[in-house]
Structure formats: C-alpha cells, structure tokens
Image (cartoon, rainbow, N blue to C red):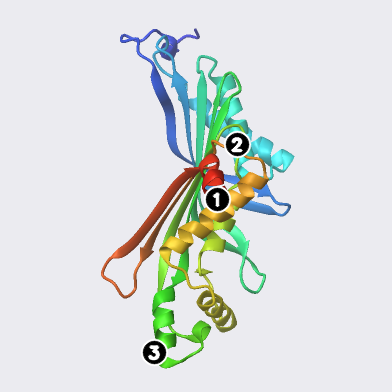
C-alpha cells in the first residue's frame, strides 16, 4: 500500500458494496462511421468493492475514460458501444481488487438524414451501459428515447366516411409520442442504430428540428399515409427489432422493452402502451400465428 492510500485499508464494517464510482463526467467522444461524428457524452463509471477494501481510487475512473476515449480517437472507433466496453477493460485493470466494472454513457443527439437527404443532428436520449467482470463475462444494455409523430387512424377514417374524402388525404388529429426502447443482452452488443431505426420505422413520421416548406409538406404527406395508434407504434417497433436481432443471431434470452407515451392533442390526458419480451418469447408468439 502506497503512503496515504487509506482506500486499501480494511473497512471497519467488512461488507461488500455493489457499485462505487463517479457520475456525470462530461466528455466528447469521436465516432467514425466512416465520417467523424462527435458525441457530447455524460459518463458514469462504477466498480464493485470487496469487503476487504475500505474504498476505491476515484481518479482511476477518470483515467479510464481518458485512455479509452484517446484509444477510440487513434483507432477511429465505429461505435460508442465499443468505446465503453474498452473503458470497462481499462477500469478492471486499474482496480485489481474489483470483480466487476460498469460504464454508462448518455448522449442527447444522434445523426441521421432528413427528407432531402441532408445530414442532421436529431435530439434523442441514448443510454449505453456496459458491464464486465474479471472473468471476461459482460452484460450490455442500450436504450433510446426519441420523440416522433403519430396520426390517429380512427379520426382520419371517421372524417373520410362522413365527408367522402380520400382516406390518405383526410384530416385527423396528430400528437407527439415519446418512445423508449431498451435492449438487454449478454456477450453481444446491440447497436443503438437498430433501436433508432425501429423508432423511426414505428412513428407515422419523425419530428425534425428544421423544416422548410418542401420538407414540411413531405413530412405531413408521409405521416398521413401511415396513421398509427399508440398500440400500432409499439408493435411496429417490437416487430422491427425482432426481425433484426433474430436475423443477426442474438441469443434467445435477449430482452426487448418498449414504452410509448402519447401527448394527446384533443384529449386532456396522455395515452400509454408498453411491452417487454425476450426473443425466445417473441419467436414462440409469432410462430404460433
């Protein structure tokens, strides 16, 4: 024990602690896909503390961030997920007393294309968690929370029937929907892009930060041709992820959780729907149809 390292003393009460670390460290991470994109990430880092050690060396968690981010820059990392997994490895090497390390990164935007093909940054809450033990076994969670738009199919159909207008050109009420998707896996990381694509496929239309008149027209036309109940939205997102993950060989115990809250425009309340299922359960449910 180095002079002054009281963290390595035995605790007065010898009990294990599951997670000890730091929260809310802000770092910029560059990802290359293949063009460079920079994410302003909020990072948390934890390790497990055995009952034989009084405390952890907090500064080593910062060092792990710095080393992992610098290595990602040099090697032109292609995903936030891989950066975090590498940071977990660095954490375990810097905390030899720990049996487990956990990294959480949150960012508030993602990069995509609008209706004209322009590259844009869209608001989103993306959270990636990577956990690794000293035997090399890891557990991963990826979640996205994205706002989109839905068009009510019931009101659209009612107007169509009562006015005799073309269905897809009939007015309806619209609402913004907050869609949360989370996927939990073992060894194999799920790309956040699978979740983002599932969200965008489920909405009647995405919401965009900047819309000129031609893009606004294209978005509204697109939305009214894809009216969705909130129940539809959850099913579309779930089915999209099921197809992608089952085709990519993810294990049957992969857990998918989808939650949607619709901020209703003509009602004084919100609508809500959710579903949680493993790939195994979905395979059984879909094959029985």
Image coordinates for residue 24, horizontal then vertical, percent: 44, 40
Image coordinates for residue 267, horizontal then vertical, percent: 29, 72
Near mark 3 (Cα within 10 A), the count class, few <14, some 14-19 or many ≥20, is: few
- Residue appearing at x 43%, y 50% in the figure: 275
In which quarter of the view is residue 6 placed?
A: top left
Q: Nearer the N terminus, badge 3 or badge 1?
A: 3
Q: Nearer the viewer, residue 58 or 92?
A: 92
- Residue appearing at x 57%, y 32% in the figure: 186
Q: Nearer the N terminus, badge 2 or badge 3?
A: 3
Distance, label 2 to label 3, CA atoms, is 50 Å
Question: Disc 2 designates what residue?
Answer: 251
Answer above or below: position of 168 versus 111: below
Q: Is residue 46 left or right of residue 87?
A: left
Image coordinates for residue 159, horizontal then vertical, percent: 40, 86
Label 2 vs label 3, nearer the camera: 3
Question: Disc 1 designates what residue?
Answer: 286
Q: Which mark is residue 162?
A: 3
Q: Nearer the viewer, residue 81 or 181?
A: 181
Distance, label 3 to label 1, CA atoms, is 37 Å
Answer above or below: position of 63 versus 216: above
């Amino acid at each position: 024990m180095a002079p002054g390292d009281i963290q390595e003393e035995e605790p007065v009460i010898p009990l294990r602690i599951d997670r000890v670390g730091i929260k809310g460290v802000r770092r910029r991470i560059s990802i290359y896909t293949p063009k460079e994109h920079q994410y302003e990430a909020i990072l948390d880092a934890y390790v497990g503390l055995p009952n034989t050690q009084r405390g952890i060396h907090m500064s080593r968690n910062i060092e792990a961030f710095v080393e992992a981010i610098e290595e990602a820059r040099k090697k032109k990392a292609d995903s936030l997920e891989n950066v975090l997994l590498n940071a977990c490895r660095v954490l375990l090497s810097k905390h030899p007393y720990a049996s487990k390390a956990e990294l959480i990164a949150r960012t508030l935007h993602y990069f995509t294309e609008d209706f004209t093909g322009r590259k844009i940054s869209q608001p989103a809450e993306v959270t990636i968690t990577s956990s690794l033990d000293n035997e090399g076994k890891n557990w991963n969670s990826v979640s996205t929370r994205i706002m989109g738009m839905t068009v009510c199919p019931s009101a659209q159909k009612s107007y169509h029937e009562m006015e005799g207008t073309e269905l897809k050109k009939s007015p309806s009420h619209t609402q913004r929907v907050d869609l949360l998707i989370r996927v939990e896996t073992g060894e194999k990381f799920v790309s956040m892009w699978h979740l983002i694509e599932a969200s965008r496929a489920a909405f009647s239309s995405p919401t965009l930060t900047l819309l000129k008149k031609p893009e606004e027209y294209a978005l509204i036309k697109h939305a009214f041709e894809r009216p969705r109940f909130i129940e539809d939205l959850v099913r579309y997102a779930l089915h999209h992820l099921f197809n992608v993950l089952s085709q990519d060989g993810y294990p049957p115990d992969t857990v998918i959780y989808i939650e949607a809250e619709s901020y209703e425009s003509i009602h004084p309340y919100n609508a809500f729907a959710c579903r949680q299922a493993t790939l195994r359960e979905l395979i059984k449910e879909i094959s029985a149809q």
